[in-house]
Amino acid sequence: MPTPALYSHGAQPAFSNNLPTELKRPEMPILYVTDRKPTNKTPQNWSYGIGRDRSFAVGEAIVGFQKNTSWEELATDATKSTRKAPYKMRIRSVDEKVRTPNYPLKYLNRHQHSSAAPAVKSEEAEAIADTKRLIQQRLKLSPKKELLIYVHGFATDFEKSLCTTAGLWHFMGREMVPITYTWPAGSGSLLRGYAYDRESSELTVFHFKRLLKWISDMPEVEGVHLIAHSRGADVTINTLRELALESLARGQNPQSRYKIRNVVLAAPDVSGEIGLEKLTDSGANRISRRWLTYTSGRDKAIGIAEYLFSSSRWGRIRWDRLSADDLEAIEFYSGFFGKEDATVEYRGRLGGSFGHEFHIANTIVSSDLVLALRFNKSPGPEHGRPLHQKGSLFWIIDENFYNQ
């Protein structure tokens, strides 16, 4: 991941002076949660493919670099726009620590009284306790008692999801506990692969819900930040919608219940109409303190999705191409969101593969992401995030981010 421009311009420090010594290492320990089927169960060398599992696993991976490097070198390069050599990541170890029972749980009486068998309930209780213990261990070292959860998108394998999470955590100052939520995606082929990944993204919602419920019961966790990319945005929206509906039905405040501080939808491969309707009709917009969406008209991967679905996608919205009906709809939906919420359109050219990974590949967009999540900046130049406001909820970010 390239250095965010806010660090190379000296606008903010890359790392706090109070960062614990244990976190000042090139190796990056990343917690992972997955409902992919394992393809190798060798200790310290677990691997996972694209098969769908009825259970899910929690483990720890160590992400390092192909070349030997020191923390001092790594920290220095975190403030430079150019480096002597690229940092290519590699997975050094993967170790599964927890395995849940298969879902749905086995029942004593399938047709009348739904009650899980005692042995299965005990198995799940053990999985919950072990998962919380893993998170608690990481929180003890973390400067912020918060979680940074990354949910990947279409055509992403297990290893790539870990490396992306590691890069985000590193440039968030290593201040939160990093978790990658990786679901069965990455089958390879375009049309059939996309169809497979889409159905996997629907199936995984049940497991993601359980994870967020377990986390919400942990008093040690003070906040949760979700970054969802591409089809991962649909996973996240559907999960939060169901959790919000459950909370509201119980008379609970969804945000207080789940402690979600930020939800970031990066290049969301979701229909804008459907996504906004899911968030607003259920009250799911109230589950997070801030909603932040990044779009780009140059995203070719989302362009392919638009062709397949014959409809516009949220991740490719452009302000200058919105119709009068679109503007009226945005104005209507803006009433459900707050002044901290923003849809940010990126108009530059640099966006990674197919222009689809601009949230991490482009140093301007990643800067805004860091300013919002790590430094809790509101949108607008007066708050330290030099975006141009175009209308309710809508902002523009361009290559002149630090030259205004």
Image (spheres, grey):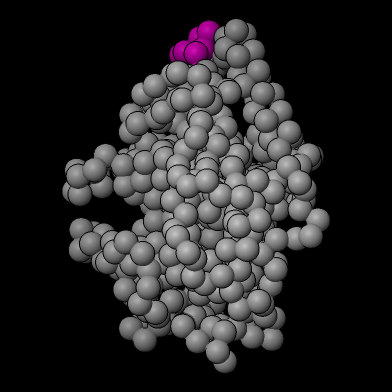
Residue at image x 63%, y 63%? 76
Q: How many marks?
A: 0
The residue closer to the viewer here, 178 or 324, is: 178
Compared to 225, does 131 lie above or below? above
Q: Which residues are the magenta region? A: 105-111
- What type of secondary structure mainly makes up the magenta span? loop
Please name whichever residue, 184 or 62, is drawn nearer the observer in this view of the structure: 62
User: In the rendered image of this protein, does residue 69 appear above or below residue 128?
Assistant: below
Q: Is residue 111 above or below residue 321?
A: above
Return the x and y of residue 127 as percentages of the image width and height.
Answer: 62, 21
Residue 172: x %, y % from top left: 63, 59
On the image, the x and y values in percent for residue 16 come to 75, 60
In the image, residue 36 sits, relative to residue 75, either above or below, namely above
Q: Residue at x 57, y 32 (%)?
A: 60
Residue 108 counted in the magenta span: yes
Q: Quadrant of residue 384?
A: bottom right
Q: Is 21 situated left or right of 285 in this image?
A: right
Q: Is residue 85 something that shows in the picture?
A: yes
Please tell me which residue lies in front, 349 or 271. Answer: 349
Q: Is residue 95 left or right of residue 129?
A: left
401 inside magenta stretch: no
Residue beneath the point at 55% across and 55% down: 168
Q: Position of residue 104 (x, y in %)?
A: 48, 22
Q: Is residue 278 visible?
A: no
Which residue is painted at 50% across and 13% down in the image? 106
